Amino acid sequence: MPYPKNCIRGIIKADFVVKDQDRRYATAELYQFRGSDRPDGMHEASINWGADKKVIGFTFNQKNNDETFKYEGGIAILQRSELDKIRKQYGPMQFNYERDRDNKDNKYHGNLLLNSTNMTSTISKMIRSVLAHHSIIHFRHEYSDLQPTGFFSNLASLFKLIVAKVFREKP
Amino acid sequence: MKNFSQGTDSNKTPDSLDDHPLEPSGSDVTHGADDSIPAFLFLSESNPTKEAWGILSKISNQSISDQTKSLLKAIDGIIGITKETTGGYGRIPPLHAYLDEDGSVLIEWIIGDFRIGFNIEPNIEDSGWHMVSNKEMGENTFSGQLLDKNQIIRLIDTIIKNI
C-alpha cells in the first residue's frame, strides 16, 4: 500500500515555530531524532501519516498523561515528496520513513528515520533543516471544528461538570 | 485577512490527504506570500543577533561558547558595516539559537525562501554551516565547515548583501 502524500509532525513547544513578519517557520529543533535500540541503527522522529482527513483532528487531540494536549505548538505538515528527495540524495540506509503498524492506539503513526553515524553533524543538521524548511505550520485555532483549549476548554469542562451535577441531584 | 506563508511552497496549499486538503477552517488565514511587505530591509534599531547572544548563558562547554561568540561577533561586525553603508533603514530577520539534545548549539537564520544554519560542536572541526533553499530559490543545499573564518565572513557578507 502506498504511503500517503503527507505526514504530520506534532509541535510540542511553541518555541519550535518562529514568526517573522507574517510568515511562520519551523526550526530544525522540531525535527529531533531520538536514539532507539533498532537493529538498523536508525534514530526516530515520530509522525502521523496523512492517511485520511481525520488525522488532523486526531493529531491535535492527542493528549499527554496529564490530559493536556500534546501539540499545543501546532502541527507541521510535510509532503512525502520532500522526504523522497532526501532519501534519494542520502540513501535509504541514512534517511527513510516507515509506518508503525503495531501501534493499536494510533493507526496513523509512523517515523522519520535518520542514521547519523555515517554522516557529519553538519549534514545531519542540514537534513533536519530541510525538513523544517519544507514544513507548513498550522495552529489549532485555525481549525474551528476542533476542541478549544485553555480558558474555553476549562469553561466547557466546568459547564459539563455543573450540568452533570445538577442532573444527578434532581430527584 | 492575514496572509501566512511558509519558507517553502508558499503559494501551495498542502495537497495532502489526497482529496482532503489540510486547510484550516478558520476565517483569518489564507496561504500565499505577503508581497506587500518588502522582504528584508535594515532597521537601524533592530538587533538580529540579540536573541542568539542569549544562548551563551546556557552553554557549559568552553569550546562551544568560544565558537559561538566568535561567530556572533563576526555576524554583528558585518551587519554593522552593512548598516553603515546602506544608511541603516530597514531590518533583517533575527537569528535563532538553541541547545540541541546532543549538546551542540544550533543557530538558524531563516531568511524567507532560504535558511542558513550553523552547528557549533565541541570539536571545532565538526562545527559547520549549511544553507537550504526552497523551490523558489532552486531547492539547493550547501554545507561547509566553520574552520575557515574567511569563508564564513564571505558567506555572511553575501547573505546580508542579498537579503
Image: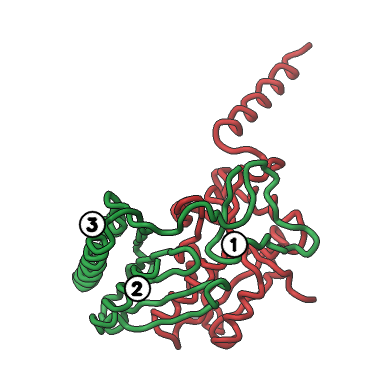
Chain colours: A red, B green
Residue at 56%, 76% (x, y): give it. A113
Residue at 48%, 63% (x, y): give it. B112
C-alpha span from label 2 to label 1: 26 Å
Report if the CB atoms under discs 3 and 2 are less than 8 Å apart: no
Q: Mark 1, chain letter? A: B
Give the residue at mark 3. B57
Give the residue at mark 2. B119
Name the side, left or right, on which A171 lies relative to A152: right
Q: Is residue A133 above or below residue A56?
A: below
Q: Quadrant of residue A55?
A: bottom right
The amino acid on which the numbered mark 3 sits, given as a three-letter code, is Ser
Labels 3 and 2: the sequence-earlier one: 3
| Tag 2 secondary structure | strand
Give the residue at mark 1. B10
| Crowding at mark 3 (Cα within 10 Å: few <14, some 14-19, many 20+) | few
Q: Mark 2, chain letter? A: B
Residue at 24%, 82% (x, y): give it. B150
Q: Mark 3, chain letter? A: B
